[in-house]
Each structure stands twice: as C-alpha cells, then as structure tokens.
Image (spheres, helix red, strand yellow):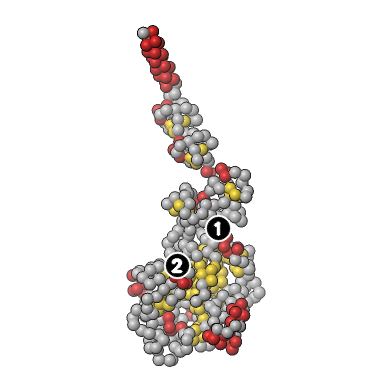
Amino acid sequence: MLHVFALLLFGTLANLIVSEDYSTLKGRDDGKFCRSDNHCKSGNCRGNRCGGRSNDSWCKTDDWCSSKNCYRHKCTIQDAYKLNGDDCSKKRECISHICENGKCIGRNKGDWCKENNWCSSGQCLKSKCTEQWPTQLFNGATVGLPWPANTKDAEDQGWKKSVNEACVSDLGEAWLYEGKRSSMHSVTLYFSPQIGHKDGIPGVLTGIQVDYYETIMDGLVGRFFSEKKKDEDGNHYHSVAVGFRDSSKYNLCDNSKPLPAIHEEYVLIAPGMENLRVPSHETSSDLTENWHEGSCIPGMGVHWFKSAETGYKNLTYKRNSVVPVVPMYIPGGSISGLFFWAPQKMQVWDNEICTPALFQRLPNLGECFTKCNFWDYGPGLNQKNDGPLFMCANTCDDKCYFEDSNDGIINTMHFFFYPINTLQCPETCRNGFNPFTDYSVY
C-alpha cells in the first residue's frame, strides 16, 4: 500500500513540474525550446525550436530547420555550400554533397536532386538530374561526327571561348574551334556561361552560327545574313545564326547561375533579324500550312523548306527566295536536325582527286577528308537535277531548280540532334514523287 501511495504521489508531482515548465515556455525567443507555436514570440515552433533549428542541428525534415534545409539529418545553410569545381575536404562542404579528389563534383544524370546546382549538368527536374535540349550534337551529312553540346565537351574537343567577343544577348557566349575564326573553321558555337571554376557547371548549347566566306544570297542580308564582318586576319564574311533559347525569357549571358532546366525543342533562325521560329514537331499546323515538305533521307529525316517571300508557302526557287536554313524531322515526330546551304562550292575539295576517290572508295579518300573544312564532305550538290548528288533531290517538287547558284554547285552543312543511324525513312516522298527518276534535267 505504501508503494502505491508513493507512485501516485510521484506521478502527481511530475505532472505539476511539467505543467509549471510548460508555463515558462510562453513568449520565448527564436532558438529556444518549444512544443507549440504559441510558446514562441514569433509564433513559429519548428523541430522544438522557436524559429526552427540552427545550422548543424539534428533534424528529420526541412521544416525543422531555420534554413528550411535538412540534409542527412543535419540542418544546413544552402548558401554556405561550395559549388561544383570548388576545393573541398569533405562532402558536407559541397552543394552536391559529393567531394572527390579534393573537388566538389555534381551529381550525374538520373540522380536525386533538390536544386539545379546539385547536378553536373546544372539541371534538376522533378527531383532528378537531367540535361538541357539539345543534349547532343552531330555534324556532317552521312557522317554524323559528335560535336560538343556543353562547354566541358567543347574544351575537351579543342573549342575555346572567344576572348575578343562580348556575350550576345540573343545567342550566348561565342566559342571558336582552336579559338580562331577562319574559312576552314567557319562555325561559331554559342553556349550559356559556365558556372564556377573549370570543373563547375558547364554552359549549355544555345546557338550555332555559320560564317560564309564566299558569295551569299545578297538579297537576304539584314534578314537572314548579317552585314559584312571581318575576322582577325582581315578576311570578310557574312554569317547566319540559329538560336536554341528564347532570349526574351532567359538571360543567356547570366554568369551567376545556370539556365533553368529547359527541354523545349526551340529553334529560331536569324535571332535579332528575321526571328523565324521553326516548328518543333512535324505535326505542327504552322509547319504543314506554311512550309514546303521535301524528301525523307535516311540518316537525316524529312526536309522542310521555307519561302523567304513573305506570304508565300510554295517555293519559286528564284534568287533570294528560299530561307538558307532547312530543318529536318523524324517522320511524324520531333525536329532531328537542320542544314545551312550556300549558293556555290564552299568545301575545300579537289574534284579531280577526291571525287573519284569518294565514289570508287579509293584509298586516298582519307587524305581528302583531313583537308576538308566544316562544310559537308564532298564536291557539293549539283544545281542541275542530274547526277548522284543534286539539291532538288531534297524537295519532292518537279518544279525545283535553285537559281541562286553561282557556279552550278550548292553546298550544305548539316547538324543533327540524334545519332544519324537512328534516323530512318519509310519512304522518300510522301506525295509519290521520285526525285531520282521523275526529273527532267534542267
């Protein structure tokens, strides 16, 4: 009986003590112990602390912490983290929570994430590290050489950011092969700024510009072609650019944070001039109503041409009447790539030696390739609808004849967003035309 009495007495005293302790919790400052919001001056009790728990305190969820960030049961201040590429001694210092060989590194594609800068790509979507579109780039008709789609790959492949050019608001930062523009390397790749140090978050591909060192379609200057420019060696050229980001929505020159995760297949021909938006899918009503459907070629996709004559869908093929950039599509699907075209031979190609080697597969063909520039390998496409290679084979139109050519040749430069061996075609022309048998030679 004495034991029972002692237990009852102890329980009563304990309740009185707890009740008295609770009464002292009211009106407490941030950082003090609490059990409910009405115990705190701020009216905010999280993780049994007014205002939330401090940095390095134990936690279960984000809402326990004053920083609103709980990682591996520790409250952390995200702004105090080091960026990818920064020096580190332990993983907790890094914003990605990964420290290897003394450097913070980003998480890989598919890894769990909370913020863009947790990922090596700088892109976190639906709590997974992902990549921006375009995720890959390939160059050359029938060849499909891998080209860089971010600044890390660009550096690895011999591209350098131009030291003489400011960031272009419509396109991004200019990168040149081996750091120099020339007729042999007549392409500028544009990227968003890299964030952090050399091993930080890479910039992503935001545009491509092709520099024309020979004759152009003069009537399209100011619409698709730039005014005449001069490279560092004093050589003149005009350029045609294509952008992959809507610069009215995104700051392509912001070097303080990576671009937000963007997976929209956005293509704009001549940003800042014509601003011609390319439909991203072959089922687009804009494409079918305002563009001319051409042939589907394996390794490329379905070609669609655009008249440069305002208000016309049908192509007349007169001088200055066809847009100098042609998009291609997976049949019934997304944009697969695009090509730039020029009204004369642009490739460094010895017709007497290299053309026979190309068609007869002679051993000296490899030597010809090593001397080529960035335009498509080969002698170019015939202006006449004749021979194994001619421009009108792309159009599925018996009225086709490109009047722009100055020397009987039209040259092309192809870029693809998919490996070319994945681009298949069920038929050449959906209108039933056969460009290899139905043309009368012009």
Residue at the (44%, 88%) spot, across then down: 385
Which residue is identified by label 1?
A: 202
Local crowd size for mark 1, using a 10 Å CA cut-off: few (<14), some (14–19), many (≥20)? many
Q: Give the image location of residue 305, x and y in percent.
A: 41, 77
Q: Is residue 107 visible?
A: yes
Which of the pair 279/302 is nearer the observer?
302
Residue 49 on image: x %, y % = 47, 30
Mark 2 and mark 1 lie on one chain; the one further toward the N terminus is 1
How many residues crowd around disc 2 within 10 Å: few (fewer than 14), some, or many (20 or more)?
A: many
Nearer mark to the viewer, of 2 and 1? 1
Q: Residue at x 55, y 58 (%)?
A: 202
Q: Who's the residue at 61% across and 56% down the image? A: 198
User: Is residue 88 positioned above or below 171 on the image?
Assistant: above
* Residue in the image at 54% along x and 46% along y: 97
- Choose between 192 and 282: the one closer to the eye: 282
Cα distance between the residues tagged 2 and 1: 21 Å
Q: Is residue 250 left or right of residue 288?
A: right
Q: What kind of residue is marked 1? A: Pro
Name the amino acid, label 2: Val
Residue beneath disc 2: 267
Q: Secondary structure at mark 1?
A: loop
Q: Dividing the image into 4 quarters, which one contains the N terminus?
A: top left
Position of 314 relative to 51 (above/below)? below
Q: Give the x, y percent position of residue 291.
A: 38, 75
